[in-house]
Amino acid sequence: MKIKQKWKSYLKRFLLIVIVFLVCWHAVRVVTLTDKNFQYLNSTVSRNIEDSFHTEEVFEINREWELGFLAISSFAITNRAFLDSSYKDRAIELNEILIQEMMSKRIQDFYGFKGFDNLCFKENPNESVIYTGYLNYMLSTYNLLTSNNKEILSLNKKVSEYLYEQYRNSSSKFLESYTGSCWTGDNVIALASLELYDLHAKTNYSIVCDEWVTSVKEHFLDKDGLMTSEVFLDYDHKKCLRYKDTEGSTINWSTMFIKHFDEEFAKEQYYRFRDNYSTNFVILRAFKENSPELDNFSKGNIDSGPIVFDYGVSATVFGYGAARAVGDSWTYKSIKLVLPFFFKKADTGVKSILYSPLSDAIFSFCATQTKFDRRYLK
């Protein structure tokens, strides 16, 4: 037993030395990734959608990845437009393509969506918040860029009204991602979409955001004061049966959306998690996944990504965006330092994230975290 413990200790030290050496060696050749990310992302959106490449090859394994690529690409592109106004016209054009694809039958069918003509809370109260929430965030942010598309304005109004009614009638203030299962990371996107809808529509739907934060603080915090990653409901979709403790990928992902409707709570959750479940490796901070269901050295799952000594790839990548969102500049810059390790040349001649178009969209979204400013609105 002692020999095994010593072996683990030596291995950890060796890996730490290797990581520090590689980061220091690589520091002299760090490039600005954001522009190259967006060159690739722009090319991917245009080429993949026009050629249906993503439907036939990239996302056939999991339709969630396709929805994620469409939505998160839109999130990132809109962020970029708010940071660089010269990109606005291109962002509007790309978002229209992405929204159109998001409304395609193949995406709607995967989530059992019954169509916008049937989007009425009294008749159809349990649509998945994954589809309606992600779509509404795309619509709300598009309408912050321009109000010239009356069809998108009307659709944004309809979906926002529906989400508002769902939240007002939920005792837990969580909506279902799948039957009986409510994921925090999906709900915060829907809630943020209502906050952003209020910005241009002058409504007060974001009152449900305050109710959600109150419900989380009263019922869904773990022993460390961190919010749950998942809430389970009964068969009537009303009563909360139990909830799952937090996970690193959930906290950091959610921080990037909660900051739109409750910046103080977003900062509280981020720093509480960072201080308890991350480690500063000299010049790199890594975040733990902290999942009781996953081994501390494994491939992880579809959300966590690979886990090494409990440090999660998703938790750390999302930590890159969360750190930028709350103003933790040291953590943001330290993680950005090692990002070039994960890039390779794509056939477009620019750099692409190693794994998939979805990963590239996520990195772009994390790198462009911004607070949407009312003064930008026309």
Image (cartoon, helix red, strand yellow):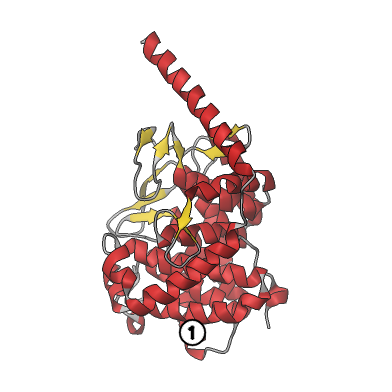
> From this viewpoint, which residue is outermost toward the right?
375
Task: Quickly name the residue at label 1.
Answer: 152
Could you say where residue 199 lies in the image, as x and y percent from the top left? 63, 75
Could you say where residue 135 lies in the image, as x and y percent from the top left? 44, 72
Q: Residues within 10 Å of mark 1 (few under 14, many from 20)?
A: some
Q: Is any atom of residue 246 visible in this view?
A: no
Q: Does residue 92 sit above or below 348 in this rendering?
A: below
Left/right of residue 113 with respect to residue 166 in the rendered view: left
Could you say where residue 69 lies in the image, as x and y percent from the top left? 41, 65
Q: Is any atom of residue 64 visible in this view?
A: yes
Q: Nearer the viewer, residue 71 or 199?
A: 71
Q: Residue at x 27, y 69 (%)?
A: 56
Left/right of residue 184 with respect to residue 204 in the rendered view: left
Could you say where residue 94 lies in the image, as x and y percent from the top left? 49, 78
Q: Quadrant where the C terminus lies?
A: bottom right
Mark 1: which amino acid?
Ile
- Number of marks drawn: 1
